[in-house]
Amino acid sequence: MRWGERRARDRFVLGSRWGEKITVSTPRPRSSTKHPSRRSTARTRRGARAIERSEGTSGEQVDGREPEETRDVGTMSFSLPVLPYEYAALEPYIDATTMNIHHTKHHQAYINNLNGAIEKTAELKGKTLEEIVQEVSSVPAEVKTVVRNNGGGHWNHCFFWKCMTSPSDTAGPMGDLKEAIEKSFGSVDEMKAKFNAAAAGRFGSGWAWLGCKDDGSLVITSTPNQDNPMMSGLAEEMCRPVLGLDVWEHAYYLKYQNRRPEYIANFWNVVNWEYLSENYQAIKAGGTAKI
Ligand SMILES: [Fe+2]
């Protein structure tokens, strides 16, 4: 079956497992700066939830599944995900102060605004974040812009945090993903050059993406503001993200000021290639990245 022949619902539901009542009232970065392997990620998540339960801030896990997103099914409101590393873990390439403000202020603001729109829009209640993002064109007109900006902002930032890891844990692309990059771009360096150009060339605020199209090919694209390449009817180049880079000034200005190309070049020192490989495999299987 070609990927494009799958029903949209089937494609996206695989990455959306939000039956759990999981709330995290206080963002709590991990205590280690080491990049968590899949096993250690699960271990630290379990540890964090144990702390949260002891503090009365979290609900119970259902069916033994790992939560992909923080959401309270009682209120249907989204909440801030916990970072898989400390704010200082990406130093010296992305500074701790920027990470702290970016996560606790900017990302939180998108969540607050999205929750506000959901609260007053019956059509949005019960939808997953991916469904909201993908189907934003059909959101009621009175909240469409708010949902486009803030639903996109929430998904994009959840994804962005996981695309990064401590500099000591970036090994470069491997396996199927490396082969796919070489097939689509000729080489990893050529892919990086196109990605860097897209990120640097985005006028104003937005994002650069490495994504996978329905025909299986990889593509570099860019979106304005908080748009996402899964936004049907809005994205110039529809694809499912493998990697994303935030090029809003709030992501780099404290350290880099107007030197966006330097921020982009240094970003490659903190790319979590293991997560990118997982994303690519999930997409190949008909799903999307797990945020
Ligand atoms: Fe941002």
Image: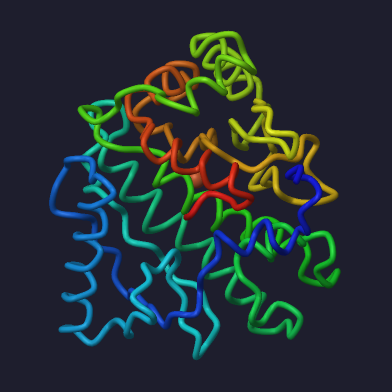
Is 43 displayed left or right of 253 in the figure? left
Q: Residue at x 52, y 66 (%)?
A: 111
* Outermost residue toward the bottom in this view: 74
Please state the horizontal and vertical placement of residue 216, each as a whole percent of the image: 68, 33
Q: Residue at x 44, y 36 (%)?
A: 277
Task: Classify 285 as above or below 214.
Answer: below
| Residue 242 vs residue 84, the one in the foreground | 242
Q: Residue at x 46, y 22 (%)?
A: 264
Displayed quadrant of residue 191: top right
Displayed quadrant of residue 94: top left
Please state the horizontal and vertical placement of residue 12, each as a whole percent of the image: 65, 59
Please state the horizontal and vertical placement of residue 149, each as a whole percent of the image: 67, 56
Q: Residue at x 43, y 70 (%)?
A: 70
Please state the horizontal and vertical placement of residue 126, each as a whole percent of the image: 64, 81
Task: Classify 189 as above or below 170.
Answer: above
Is 117 displayed left or right of 270 in the figure? right
Displayed quadrant of residue 34: top left
Task: Classify 254 as above or below 56.
Answer: above
Instruction: State how many labels appear.
Output: 0
Is 221 displayed left or right of 17 in the figure? right
Is 260 displayed left or right of 222 in the figure? left
* Outermost residue toward the front in this view: 1
Rendered image coloring scheme: rainbow
